[in-house]
Amino acid sequence: MVALVIALALFFDFTNGFHDTANAMATPIATGALKPRMAVALAAVLNLVGAFLSTAVAQTISGGLIREGSNGVQITPVMIFAGLIGAILWNLVTWLLGLPSSSSHALFGGLIGAAVVGAGFGSIDVSVLLSKVVFPAILAPVTAGLVAYLATKIAYAVTKKKQRGRFRYGQVFTSSLVSLAHGTNDAQKTMGVITLTLIAAGTQKAGTGPALWVIVVCALAIAIGTYTGGWRIIRTLGKGLTEIEPGQGFAAEAATTATILASTHLGFALSTTQVASGSVIGTGIGRKGASVRWRTAGRIAVGWVITIPAAGLVGALASWIALAGIVGILADAAVAVGVIVWIFVYSRRNRVHAQNVHLEPTAFVRPKRRKRDRTGRTAK
Amino acid sequence: MTIEWGNFLIVLVASVVAACGVVALFSVGIRLVSASGPWLRATGIASFVACGALVLYGVYLIVPTLHR
């Protein structure tokens, strides 16, 4: 059971990495500041480094959403197992649709679903859900959008037209910062999950930090995930929402970095994915002549709204089946692996990779039809 | 349910100041570094350096061992 949870947690870490490559690297890839392969390699290395830099593991992986502790619910390995299945499946579905959605919300959703089945609706703290998830989800893109809008205005007011290509050099640094910040945050979640599982199973003392091997495998899992690159999501963020020029890319990344750092250090946590998406939209509004494809933005917003219920539903279902004991757990694992394999096979029908990431998306996220771009590369 | 509006406002202001600062400095750098006149060039280079310093401050904030 413990081994199964660890394997799932690492796979979640992997999906987290490849889901979130886009946050940092969609804009430099879109403007040609970095070659696609180079960008994901850089992001992977920075995520790996970031994971080692910070090992302050969140003691409550649910972030207080579930009433944990002596007078509340004891989170069991089975609950974590079911929650992880919900989170992973939802991450893969949103990846298939090319939607940037928060991996932490998927994890919260899965755990909530599992906890509701395991311990009833009373185990969920609705006020924490509202103040920590729902309101930040509205505020994050608005904040980042406003910041990116202002930054874009400044960038375009100060520079002359033919000078703006030089923003590409700056983009390398700002996008690297986003990647590093991501590594210091997101790998910790999986370390927390694995450490809590080990403590629950009695193989590790309560109150101790993650073991070295846990840190190493988590860092590797998120780095490999990042390198694999969630090209579909990179395409949506880099091309699907608006046409991005280097000046906008730089402004958007500066806005993303500033908003994330401010929110983590001044005590108002915001989701990286939602901040990054908001920045891209803001920069699209900020440049004259750029248009934002609001239909795509709307699809992304819908994705955010249903992330927690959807992951929760899968988590609840997995948890309900797991109540049947070892047979149920094995059935869960088998079904999950089946669905994961199916998603991967299905995704190959319409593959997005480093070579065609510059094409306009047409399959699931449909912007207005364009005549150019059919040859494989966008005109700069 | 408590939304910490005060904290949110601080985050908003800090983000605007930091992001606009970095972008403004980098833009001024781009604009002036190829301008004629030694003073303008020097100002351009200085704003690149200031921008780099802000980015380094970002790294400082990200790496917890540096500020704890």
Image (cartoon, grey):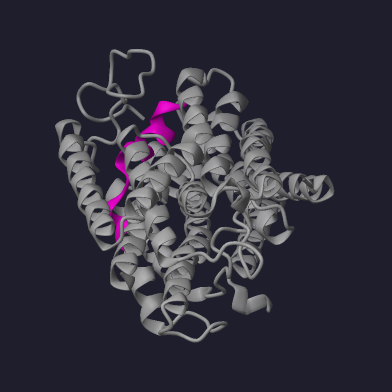
Q: Residue at x 38, y 54 (%)?
A: A82
For the view shown, which residue lies furthest in the front direction?
Answer: A324
Q: Residue at x 47, y 54 (%)?
A: A118
Q: Residue at x 80, y 51 (%)?
A: B7
Q: Is residue A135 visible?
A: yes
Range drawn in magenta: A224-241
Q: Nearer the viewer, residue A377 or A218?
A: A218
Vertical placement of residue A192 versus A148, above or below: below
Q: Tally the marks.
A: 0
**x, y percent for residue A144:** 63, 39
Determine the image quadrant of residue A374: top left
Q: Quadrant of the N terminus of chain A?
A: bottom left
**x, y percent for residue A15:** 34, 52
**x, y percent for residue A100:** 44, 39
Q: Residue at x 64, y 61 (%)?
A: B49
> Per the image, is A236 magenta?
yes
Vertical placement of residue A3 versus B43, above or below: below
> Per the image, is A227 magenta?
yes
**x, y percent for residue A286:** 62, 27
Determine the image quadrant of residue A4: bottom left
